[in-house]
Image (spheres, rainbow, N blue to C red):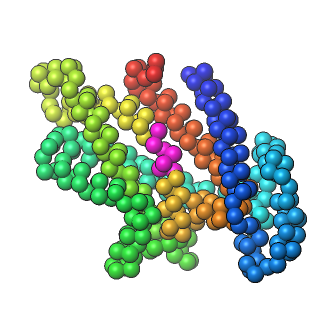
């Protein structure tokens, strides 16, 4: 187990170095400037160059990246080029909102996927199986951005049921119910946009387990259908299901950032989109490092759990 953790930490360090450098290079050569975030775009070229010079943005790519990397290794992610605030302070303010949205959505997606997949397997090839497949695939066919706008149009504009933006109404920031009300649409988009592929995978995995000899033996012993499905089939498939959820966490995290941007949810996603547009590289790179560490941690945790619940994964 210690060897596994050590290997994953080495892999995480390599990913942090490689991804941060590639991301920095793309921001460096992208069009635009952080100057346009705080001053009108009618600014003179001379003044623009002077501001960039004051921020050390006129230095070569490797020189700028080296300065950032040396500070980051010491835990100092520098200051935002837009607001001038410490990046650590900005992330400390924004991260809890993203963690709440992502954790809640991922938990609902996990349990709902298993429930729907079980129904599809129990009533295989029935109308219910085909109906669940049709509905989930319909939402999956829509991009996350389009699905978000569609739900906003229907539930916020036409029906005026849910709020379309922010984390809470003004003056209700400490009201938990009001915050949950604002989470309804973002969570729904994240769940619906990923539900189809997870349901299909879990359905296929459960069917593979259903066709094994020990399952047929369990039915032959006269065990109840409920016990066979939940105690034998689901337990046998749980390792593969968790592994797939862990492998898909990257796309889920990126989807969370997009949803936050559409719904103006004051989390990391909304911040990173704005920072990329205005080339605020200290903020972008800090969020990138956080995202990589979260993905590595989730996959490591999933791998450890898989080895504990299913010995077959021990040599995988």
Q: Visible in this render: residue 94? A: no
Q: Quadrant of the C terminus?
A: top left
| Residue at image location 78% in from the left, 45% down from the top | 69
Which quarter of the rendered picture does the N terminus lie within? top right
Residue 18 image point, x, y percent:
68, 40
Instruction: Please give the range of residues in magenta.
Output: 247-253
Image side of residue 151 versus residue 222, left or right: right
Q: Is residue 272 visible?
A: yes
Q: Nearer the viewer, residue 8 or 168?
A: 8
Give the residue displayed 54% in from the left and 58% down from the top. 257
Image spot of residue 244 (x, y percent):
41, 37
Image location (x, y in percent) of residue 28: 74, 56
Q: Position of residue 103 (x, y in %)?
A: 48, 51
Does 146 appear above or below 194?
A: below
In the image, residue 156 lies in the stretch drawn in magenta:
no
Between 135 and 308, the one lying in front of the other is 135
Q: Seen in the image, is 91 located left or right of residue 35?
A: left
Main secondary structure of the magenta stretch: helix
Looking at the image, residue 173 sits to the left or right of residue 75; the answer is: left
Residue name at image x 36 percent, y 74 percent: 155
């Amino acid at each position: 187990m210690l060897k596994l953790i050590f290997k994953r930490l080495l892999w995480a360090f390599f990913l942090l170095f490689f991804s941060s450098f590639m991301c920095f290079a793309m921001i460096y050569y992208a069009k635009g400037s952080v100057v346009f975030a705080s001053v009108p775009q009618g600014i003179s070229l001379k003044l623009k160059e002077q501001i960039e010079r004051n921020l050390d943005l006129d230095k070569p790519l490797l020189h700028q990246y080296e300065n950032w990397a040396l500070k980051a290794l010491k835990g100092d992610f520098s200051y935002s080029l837009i607001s001038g605030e410490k990046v650590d302070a900005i992330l400390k303010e924004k991260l809890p909102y993203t963690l709440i949205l992502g954790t809640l959505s991922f938990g609902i997606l996990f349990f709902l996927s298993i429930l729907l997949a079980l129904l599809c397997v129990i009533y295989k090839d029935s109308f219910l199986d085909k109906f669940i497949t049709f509905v989930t695939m319909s939402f999956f066919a829509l991009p996350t951005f389009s699905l978000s706008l569609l739900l906003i149009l229907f539930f916020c504009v036409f029906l005026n049921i849910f709020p379309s933006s922010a984390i809470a109404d003004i003056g209700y920031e400490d009201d938990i119910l009001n915050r949950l009300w604002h989470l309804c649409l973002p969570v729904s988009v994240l769940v619906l946009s990923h539900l189809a592929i997870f349901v299909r995978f879990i359905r296929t995995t459960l069917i593979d387990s259903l066709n094994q000899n020990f399952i047929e033996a369990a039915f032959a012993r006269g065990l109840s259908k409920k016990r066979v499905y939940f105690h034998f089939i689901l337990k046998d498939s749980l390792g593969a299901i968790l592994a797939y959820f862990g492998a898909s966490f990257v796309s889920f995290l990126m989807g969370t950032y997009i949803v936050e941007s559409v719904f103006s949810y004051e989390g990391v996603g909304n911040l990173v989109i704005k920072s990329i547009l205005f080339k605020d590289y200290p903020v972008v790179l800090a969020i990138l490092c956080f995202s990589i560490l979260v993905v590595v941690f989730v996959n490591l945790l999933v791998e450890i759990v898989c080895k504990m619940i299913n010995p077959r994964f021990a040599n995988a």
